[in-house]
Amino acid sequence: MNEKTKLMLVDDEPDFLEIIGKFFSRRKIAFETANGCLEALDWLARDLFDVVIMDISMPGLDGFKCMSEMKKVQPEIEIIFLTGHASLNTGITCMKHGAFDYCLKPIDFAELFEKIVLARRKISGKTP
């Protein structure tokens, strides 16, 4: 993955953010963390991001509403949703709302990394 790829991790579970943050830090991938949608929107107001990895179920604004607000600020941003309540319907709902893709919790890091690479290629106009 291009080292210039900028990620944001959005989840209301601090332990999860720490674990996934370590995964990206070890791979020298730039990222920021947000404990919820409002904090994520604050980050987006200050910086550009390529890909957001975001939990669907969060207090306040859920992932779908948060994605809608993010795309108003930066339409080309790609969102990969995380869910612990996955089903085919959840995946379809994510895509209908405009997500790039989704992953199940607990996370398969190799799968998530591949989806990030594909999302980044889409942004840069390269076919996966």
Image (spheres, grey):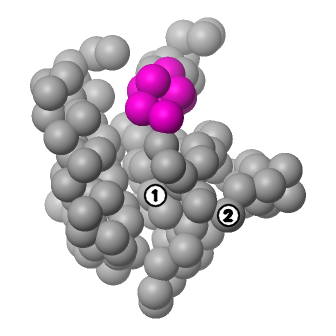
Magenta region includes residue 43: no
Q: Which residues are magenta?
A: 108-115
- Label 2, secondary structure: give it: loop
Q: Foreground residue, 103 or 80?
A: 103
From where the camera sits, is residue 45 visible?
A: no
Amino acid residing under circle 2: His
Q: Vertical placement of 1 versus 94: above or below?
A: above
Query: Seen in the image, is 88 located left or right of residue 39?
Result: right
Image vertical order of residue 28 relative to residue 57, above or below: above
Determine if the magenta segment contains residue 112. yes
Outermost residue, top direction?
127
Where residue 104 appears, as percent x and y from the top left, is: 59, 48
- What residue is at 85 percent from the left and 58 percent from the top? 89
The residue that mark 1 highlights is 54
Residue 13 at x, y percent in the picture: 33, 70
From mark 2 to mark 1, how far is it between C-alphas?
14 Å
**Mark positioned earlier in the residue sequence (2 or 1):** 1
Residue that sits furthest to the front in the current view = 106
| Quarter of the image where one finds residue 102 | top right
Q: Position of residue 37 (x, y in %)?
A: 39, 74
What residue is pinned by disc 2? 85
Q: Nearer the viewer, residue 47 or 81?
A: 81
Question: Image quadrant of residue 33?
Answer: bottom left
Comparing 73 with 9, the one in front is 9
Q: Residues within 10 Å of mark 2 (few under 14, many from 20)?
A: few
Q: Main secondary structure of the magenta part?
A: helix
